[in-house]
Amino acid sequence: MATLVIMPQKWPSRLIASSLPKYRLNKSICASIKNNSKSEVRKEDIVIVGAGIAGLATAVALQRMGIGSLVVEQAESLRTGGTSLTFSKNGWKILDAIGVGTDLRPQFLQIQGIVMKSEDGTEMRSFNFKDEDPTQEMRAVERRILLETLANQLPTNAISFSSKLKNIEITDNNETILKLEDDSRISAKIVIACDGIRSPVAKWMGFSEPRYVGYCAIRGLGSYPNGKQFDPKVTYIYGRGVRAAYVPVSPTKVYWFVCFNSPSPGPKITDPSILREEAVKLVKNWPKELLNVIESTPDDTIIRTPLVDRWLWPGLSPPPSKGNVVLVGDAWHPMTPNLGQGACCALEDAVVLAKKVAQSLKFGNLTVEDAFRSYADERWQRIFPLTVRANLAGGLLQMDNSAVCSFRNNILVPKLIRLGPMLEHTNFDFEPLNFDSV
């Protein structure tokens, strides 16, 4: 018997909302679904671990294929903290395919291009996306609104909050039992682990911890309640071992980040006043517009993150599935944000896996194990190169050698960089989520 054991942590009783209306910004989405007897085992066809972007998108994609699922989430409600995510055209194609694109688009500004500046504010290069690729679509989306929009697509009893996974057991009969912190148990035919970068399920499968890449990011979401006019472009600013960017999300919100080299991840810092002070100190002599955005950021949106990734070396990394348990998104392939593809790739995983699962469960074309292997083979070909490219791009941009930075500012950016190769990774095709294409 294989068992995953996660250190216990006290959580409130599990919640679900069978008697409440559809989730609309309501933390009390769920009411109790505790079993009368802890020895009872609840039967589910598919259980998704984690109600983040990967988990909710997978649940919605499966629903589009006529397949229900239960999402178990350790937090008491949707984890809507944080800032925003940038989606390129591949991400928007999938958001359309799972039925939420039209709800999200009107809320966020379309980004028309990028501007690259040196730390003194000198513009080195600018691009307009449509000049290179008329089909390109890029918008920054608030994480809170994205999660709530995805959750709204699911039945009211589809998400079980305060449901922290304690361990997984695969019995001698190949039955998968999920034991939760409240000692309730779920028997699942399929388990889809979307439990994030530090995934306990990935560790159980034999994956190494994600590797720290040598730099951290402070992020925030500037707020302008009365509105403020910003050029609808991503503005990148490069220094020595430090870089920053800001981009308008909506007429009242601006996302920003500051990346800085650090030999170690350092202590976890959550005090927003300390993080704001650190960010301002790093870019204190940089363009005033960036400093104004940082100063206009509410405390509850400022976060600091050590950046990590995991390279899925062929023949060395474990497969992303074990029996009827499979990994999706950051749980399988954490990557640095230098290409803006982490969330997009999680969405891609969701639709590809949903098709494979439908082929197995609804049409019997594949066994579950074969469906997972097909998913792994298809996704690895895209995920591994993107992870490597994102890492190498970040390493180049974070260099603090004066000669290298001079080459970047005077030759590489102004004369050599082309927009086409920078956008090539946003091309992604997939089969539509309908029964005819299964």
Image (tube, grey):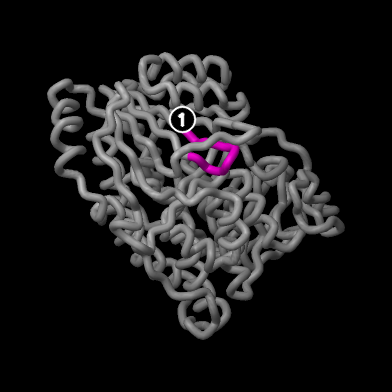
Q: Residue 25 or 365: which is nearer the viewer?
A: 25
Q: Is residue 149 above or below residue 225?
A: below
Q: Is residue 213 magenta?
A: no
Is 18 in front, or is 132? 132
Percent x, y for residue 380?
Answer: 33, 59
- What's the residue at 49%, 46% (across, down)? 140
Image side of residue 424 versus residue 167, left or right? left
Tell which of 243 and 317 is nearer to you: 243
Magenta segment, principal secondary structure?
strand
Query: Residue at image x 37%, y 62%?
Result: 379
User: Compared with residue 246, is residue 70 higher up or lower down, i.e. above or below?
Assistant: below
Residue 357 position within the rendered picture, expressed as x and y whole percent measured from the top left: 52, 71
Q: Residue 212's quadrant in the figure?
A: top left
Q: Is residue 254 magenta?
A: yes
- Can residue 315 be seen at all in this image of the molecule? no
Question: x, y percentage for residue 291?
Answer: 46, 22
Q: Secondary structure at mark 1?
A: strand
Question: Would residue 348 be visible to someone looking at this image?
Answer: yes
Magenta-drawn segment: 248-256
Image x and y of residue 125, in percent? 25, 39
Along the viewing direction, whichever of 50 and 347 lies nearer the viewer: 347
Q: Is residue 84 left or right of residue 244?
A: right
> Which residue sits furthest front?
229
Residue under the point 61% across and 26% down: 298
Amino acid type for the residue under numbered disc 1: Thr
Residue identified by numbered label 1: 305
Please tell me whether residue 376 is drawn above or below residue 418 in the rendered image: below
Q: Residue at x 19, y 38 (%)?
A: 414
